[in-house]
Amino acid sequence: TTSPAASSSVDAVVAPDDYHRLSDQQSDLLALLEVSDRASAALMLPVAYSVRDAAGIRPDHLATAVRRLVAYHPAFRTTFRHDRQIIAETVHLPDDFARVLDVRAAPGTRGTHATSLGARTAALDRARAIATREAAAALPTLDAAAPLARCIIFHVSTDEAVVFLLLHSLIADTAALRLLGGQLATAYRHPEASTLALVAESSLAGFTTVDLAYVQ
């Protein structure tokens, strides 16, 4: 899979037409959910991306980039036409769509160092445990008012963050996730960064994940 051309801005976005189109079955289900019950198709799909940036991670910027990219999905957009033939668009994403959590070891913690492999592994374990709880809790609590997407960004080291996306099965098909991964790499890359890699984490809580690997 080839990611889009690189951009130097964290706020870079792609045109809505570049996003994958929903299948007929997904469109029918989405229309059904908009009318009544989201819980009728309540499977959630979590995917975690490891983001390494030589320029230093800015989780707040990363949250903005992910929100902008996810907001372009057809499931979150309503397009309508005014009487004056002016086309307008409304994006439906919860205000608390993205959270940023720092799971790095506290300064001075015995036996750890900010740049050590052990500290990174421990931070990833903490992130994975939190993400697993989120995934396990999604199914029984999903109802008509529940968001179709949630995001947690774990700050695991000075130059690495993990993006955990919990997406409704109507949204999270393979094509969408692969394209989102490439777009995220493009949107977050800094001009001074030497490399940026996105690598899918292993499966969480028995849910299906999609393997992704982008190196720019």
Image (tube, grey):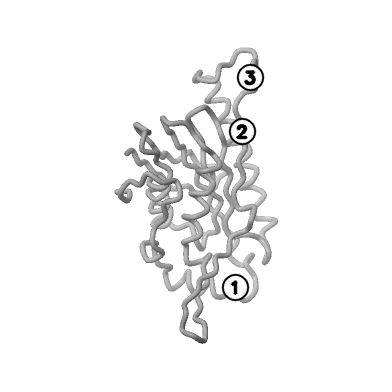
Mark 2 sits on what residue? 102
Which three-letter amino acid code belongs to the residue tagged 1? Glu
Kindly report which numbered mark, 2 or 1, lies closer to the viewer in this rendering.
2
Q: Which mark is residue 34?
A: 1
Q: Amino acid at mark 2?
A: Asp
Q: CA distance from mark 2 to mark 3?
A: 12 Å
Quadrant where the C terminus lies? Answer: top left
Query: Secondary structure under badge 2?
Result: strand
Q: Residue at x 39, y 44 (%)?
A: 185
Residue for point 59% across, 52% down: 150
In whole angstroms, how far apart are the C-alphas of marks 2 and 1?
35 Å
Q: Looking at the image, which residue is at 41% across and 47% down? A: 187
Q: Nearer the viewer, residue 85 or 148?
A: 85
Tag shown at residue 178: none
Regarding mark 1 in the picture, which secondary structure is present there? Answer: helix
Farthest-out residue, bottom: 83
Looking at the image, is 78 positioned above or below residue 203? below
Task: Of the two numbered discs 2 and 1 on the same chain, state the one appearing first in sequence.
Answer: 1
Q: Residues within 10 Å of mark 1 (few under 14, many from 20)?
A: few
- Residue 75, how many percent across, how many down? 51, 66
Disc 3 from disc 1: Cα separation = 47 Å
- Which residue is identified by label 3? 107
Classed neighbour count for the residue bearing mark 3: other residues with Cα under 10 Å, few (<14), some (14–19), many (≥20): few
Circle 3: element type: loop
